[in-house]
Image (tube, grey):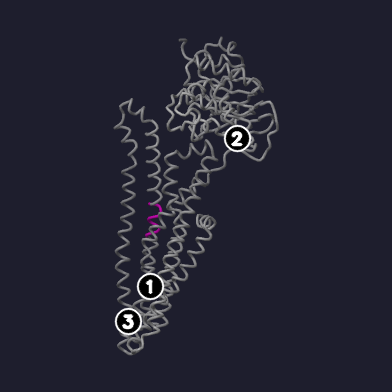
Amino acid sequence: MTLLYALRRAPWWTLVSVVSRAVGIAVALALPAGLARAVDAALAGAPGSAVAWLGVLLAVAVVTGMLEVWASSAGSVAVEVSLRRAVVRRVLDAGVPGQRRFPAGDVSSRLVTGAAEASGLVPIVLSVLGTAVLSAGGLVALALIDWSLAVAFVVCVPVAVILVRRFVAETAGLMRSYQELQGRLAARLVEALAGARTIQASGTLTREVERVLAPLPELTAFGRATWAAQRRTVWKVGLLNPLTGIVVLAVAGVGVSGGRLSAGSWVAVAGYVTIALGLFGVLDTVTGLAHIRAGAARLADVLALPSGPGGGLALPDGPGAITFRSVTLRVDGEVVLDGLDLDIPAGRSVAVVGRSGAGKSTLAALAGGLLAPDAGEVLLDGVAVAGVRAGELRRAVAYAFERPALLGGTVHDLIAYGSAGASRDEVEVAALLVSADGFIRRLPDGYDTRLDRAPLSGGEVQRLGLARAVVGERRVLILDDATSSLDTATEAEVTATLTRLLAGRTRIVVAHRATTAARADLVVWLENGRVRATGPHAQLWHDPTYRALFGPPS
């Protein structure tokens, strides 16, 4: 499959490689005969045309060799770029499930190592096939010179084939295990870098270093096992190679002494036996092939991820009513939402509350199509969310998260991200809605400040995430703990503004503060993956278990 993928992504470079390789093989097979002809002509005292022909062959060999290297390199780069794009697209398209299965560090390892190794498949295959054809041609040439030469060579072939096959079978699994451990180590390193402040504040640097580097002993063991397998095979093949050459040349020497072969023929035999022995020297190439197989298998794991939610259904205009019908969702085999039924009225503000692990963020992700239920369905204005075209769904539903991703080059780009064509006026209005315009204008270049030059607090980042969510005319706005870093006064100001100016739009707010729940029109109380109760905050507040969700009164 990887070979077909590579051929489709770089067809013309592959064609140039094949043609140059074929011409190179023909020239390589002609060179010993040309050399023999030149030697015989020189011994006869008339070297002119034979030497000129030998010079032409050498020139063609140099040109085709350079052309093959150029085409192989260009083709490998094209395939590598395409593979990396395909992996990134697949991971992002798979959405939340894909990110859970493949941590960021593991994906980075597969992109950097796996793609680079898999992209070399076509050159490696052409090299192996070319060497096999060239060796076969060398063997045929030996047989044409004298059948006994071919017999002497063939006797040694089965031993080399057995050695190489055993080596491939042994190293393929070792290579994949080695690369998987590299990915695990990279994933742990990314986690540690993301939590660097926590590690420093906790004084757990030594323990974290040990955790990150824990796969190293096993990684070392697999690396040494690979080298040991190569060491056990290389010396045997290396010894078999010259022994075979000596046997064939000895047989040719007997032919020369008996008058059956000329001195030029002996020179040709020396060339052809070297060509035929090329097949014995593919061990390094086979090692590269084992690397490629391991890298391709790791990429295939990612590319096999199912596509994320989204189908071909159109989403008609509507007020933004959301319905959950017997929705069940499992994560890593555990039930997070269990047969949940819920109606979220259009144009209302709904707070979702519950203890940690109750399924609040999962419900929010299902409502906007970031996840698809394992059973049941989620409807937006009567249409199954999982089947709606992704582009239409994103134009209808906006999200703001607890830790917004800083995507885009500038502050303006960040707010306009996901709202193609948003003007500066629309971006500034969105920033005003969430009380972000003031601190943005204090930045070095205002809205044009590059994000890597913008010193932002956690609360300021959250307000930029909120601005990004409200910049478009979406019918549904989902805030997944998106105001947790705001102080109480700022949260109240932002919420009041959004309530006033976004009246008529459906708003789902994952809430951890009683004040946030109190400002919602309706509260949905989740417990153990089910709806325990719904109603206004004031009504639910009479239940002491509900009050306990928000901790002791301050």
Q: Secondary structure at mark 1?
A: helix
179 relative to 234, above or below = above
Gap between marks 3 and 2 measured at Cα: 80 Å
Instruction: Report if the CB atoms under discs 3 and 2 are less than 8 Å apart.
Output: no
Q: Secondary structure at mark 2?
A: loop
Residue 113, position in %: x, y?
41, 48
Gap between marks 1 and 3 measured at Cα: 17 Å
Tag 1 residue = 275
Residue 297, position in %: x, y?
46, 50
How packed mark 1 is, by other alpha carbons closer than 10 Å (few <14, some 14-19, many 20 or more), is many
Q: Quadrant of the C terminus?
A: top left
The amino acid beneath tag 1 is Ile
Tag 3 residue = 251
Labels 1 and 3: the sequence-earlier one: 3
Which numbered mark, 1 or 3, is in the foreground of this view? 1
Q: Which residues are magenta?
A: 167-174
Residue 176, position in %: x, y?
41, 50
Residue 94, picture quadrant: top right
How packed mark 2 is, by other alpha carbons closer than 10 Å (few <14, some 14-19, many 20 or more), is few
Gap between marks 1 and 2 measured at Cα: 63 Å
The amino acid beneath tag 2 is Gly
Residue lying at 59% horizontally and 20% vertically, measured from the top left: 498
Tag 2 residue = 421
Residue 310, position in %: x, y?
61, 38
How packed mark 3 is, by other alpha carbons closer than 10 Å (few <14, some 14-19, many 20 or more), is some
Please name whichever residue, 49 or 368, is drawn nearer the observer in this view of the structure.
49
Q: Can the viewer see residue 337?
A: no
Instruction: Report if the CB atoms under discs 1 and 3 are less than 8 Å apart.
Output: no
Labels 3 and 2: the sequence-earlier one: 3
Residue 31, picture quadrant: bottom left
